[in-house]
Structures are given as C-alpha cells and as structure tokens.
Image (cartoon, helix red, strand yellow):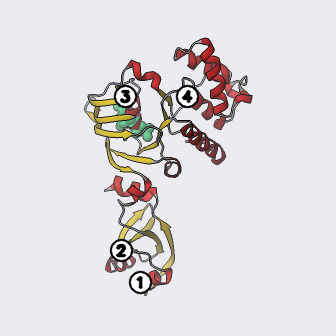
Amino acid sequence: MLNIENLSKSYGKRSVLQDLTLHIEAGEIYGLLGSNGAGKTTTINILCNLLSADSGKIAINNKPVSEATKPLIGVAPQENLLYKALSCEENLNFFARIYGLSNQERRKQVQLSLEAVNLADRAKSPVETLSGGMQRRLNIATAIVHHPKLLILDEPTTGLDIEARYEIWELIRQLQSQGMTILLTTHLLEEAERLCQRIGILKNGRIVAEGTLAELRQLIPAQEIIIVQTEDKASAIACAQYYGFSTRHYGNDLAFLLTEHLELKEIIDRFDGISLDSISRQQVRLEHIYIEVTQS
Ligand SMILES: Nc1ncnc2c1ncn2[C@@H]1O[C@H](COP(=O)(O)OP(=O)(O)OP(=O)(O)O)[C@@H](O)[C@H]1O
C-alpha cells in the first residue's frame, strides 16, 4: 500500500534520512518508532508532499507521491490543528472543503466522521469547551473526513490521561476494522505493542529493526529478563558472566538476560554469596528490544 525505497533527506549539512526503506501493507497498523529527531516527522512531511526528498521513491497504492496522491492520505499531526472558537461540525466542514468534497458529500462525511470519533452529540460545541481527549479525537476526525486510504497518526495520545488514551486506542482499532491503513508514530512503546501489527524502529534516518513483535523478540538473546537490586553490582555482574547471562543497564536497573527459563530458586542459587535486595522477572518487551537496537 505504501512503499518507501531508499529515501534520503538532508537539511543543509545535516543528514536526517539515509536510504530509508519501508513497506506498509493495506489494512495494517504500522508503528514507526524512533527517538526525538530520528526523522519521523520529516518522513511524514515527504509522504504528504509537503517536503521533497533528496533521493529515493515513495508510492502510495502504486502511485508516486504527488499532489494527486494527497487525497489518499489523512494526517492527524502531533499538535491539534483545530479552530478553537469554531464548533466540531464547523471545523470538519472547513477541512472537508479543503479536500474539495461536494456539499452533499461533505454533509455525509462530516456526520460520519463525528460518529466515528464518538462526538456526534457535541457537533455544535465550540472546540474550546471540549476535553483534551475529545479535542484529540476531533483532530483525528479532521484527518478522516475525506475518507483517506492511509491515515497517519503522529503521536496520537501524547499528553492524554489513561482513559482518553484507551478511547483513542479503541478508535484506532475501529478505523482499522473499517479498512483503513494506519501509520502511527509514538514514543509510548506500550501503545505500539498493543496496536501495531508491525513495527519499524528508526535510528539516524534508517530502519534498524522491523517486524511483528514476535519477530522483533528474536533480536534480543533472552527468554526472559531478571532485574536485580544490589549494593554489590560488580559481584553480581561477575557472577552473571560466569553463568553466561548477558548484562544490561535499563536506566538505573541492573538486568540480566536469561536464554532459558529458570525457576526463581535456581536463579537465587546462581547468585549465592552475593547480597541481593531483590530479584524480579520480566518478559521481553518492546522497550527492551528498542534499547537493544537503538543503543548498539
Ligand atoms: N526545517 C528544518 N530545518 C533544519 N533541520 C530540521 C528541520 N526540520 C527538522 N529538522 C531536524 O531534522 C531532524 C529530524 O527531525 P524530525 O522532526 O523529522 O524528527 P522526529 O523523529 O519527528 O522527532 P520528534 O520525535 O521529536 O517529533 C532533527 O534533528 C531536526 O532538528
């Protein structure tokens, strides 16, 4: 559905995208992850034909990106793009006009978009009277009012409370079930884990890892991870090395990667003679994989 091949882009001497290649299948939710400044927004702007690449190819539904492909894409940007004094309906009408929908089509699509984001009962409410979560849902409605094939959600839940976040997650799943292909950027790894069928991790303008969660798990040499609290980290690390456990530092946490399942007693026995304050076990999660591929 979306094919990006060898995309490169520099701002002056700063190279931001370097031979970026990624493919998104029709109907999937693809999560594009990367630290601040990794090049996600630059990629989105090139996709939307707002910025030109230095080299490379992008095609949406086999059509090269151009003014003609703009209607195939809907973008909900990081910062809500809404007119606060206008009502929900007026905002949606404004965006529908920009996309050139006929009067009849516009009435239908505005109503459908309001229903899709569960704001039909707030159609006449000025945006400034809506909660943060509602405003974010309306921001998504403005991106789907012209019924695009590809919906781009740039950090759709950043800054929202957990209930508003759940509502947006449910909305994203519903849009997918209606046939939309979704490109999602997020810094919330749990969001990517819960929503995305495939995930690409961007570092220095390149995809350094890509796949389903199960495929990405293969990139970390661990069945599970143990987190150890101890005053004597050096001895714990030496002991772990002896038993072949790889060491990791996740923030202040000292972690060891286990390549096979061990009972808790077996783990404690391995650290015999070392004063441990606590040991906890964790499943391998996207955050571990992310650190593995971005910090190596
Ligand atoms: N117009 C511009 N001129 C010069 N440099 C730019 C411009 N836009 C972005 N950059 C730089 O390009 C790099 C990539 O920026 P981009 O906004 O694409 O990253 P991002 O992955 O979206 O980051 P974030 O997660 O913070 O939104 C950054 O170093 C940024 O400072």
Q: Secondary structure at mark 2?
A: loop
Report the amino acid beneath label 1: Arg
Above or below for 192 versus 54: below
| Residue 144 badge | 4
As measured in the structure, the alpha-carbon distance from the residue carrying label 1 to the one carrying label 2 is 11 Å
- Residue position marked by numbered label 1 in the rendering: 270
| Residue 245 badge | 2
Report the amino acid beneath label 4: Ile
As measured in the structure, the alpha-carbon distance from the residue carrying label 1 to the one carrying label 3 is 53 Å
Quadrant where the N terminus sits is top left
Report the amino acid beneath label 3: Ile
Question: From the viewer's perspective, is the residue at label 4 or at label 3 nearer?
Answer: 4
Sequence-wise, the earlier of marks 1 and 3 is 3
- Residue position marked by numbered label 3 in the rendering: 46
Q: Which residue does the image show at 60% across and 34% down from the upper left? A: 136
Quadrant where the C terminus sits is bottom left
As measured in the structure, the alpha-carbon distance from the residue carrying label 3 to the one carrying label 2 is 43 Å
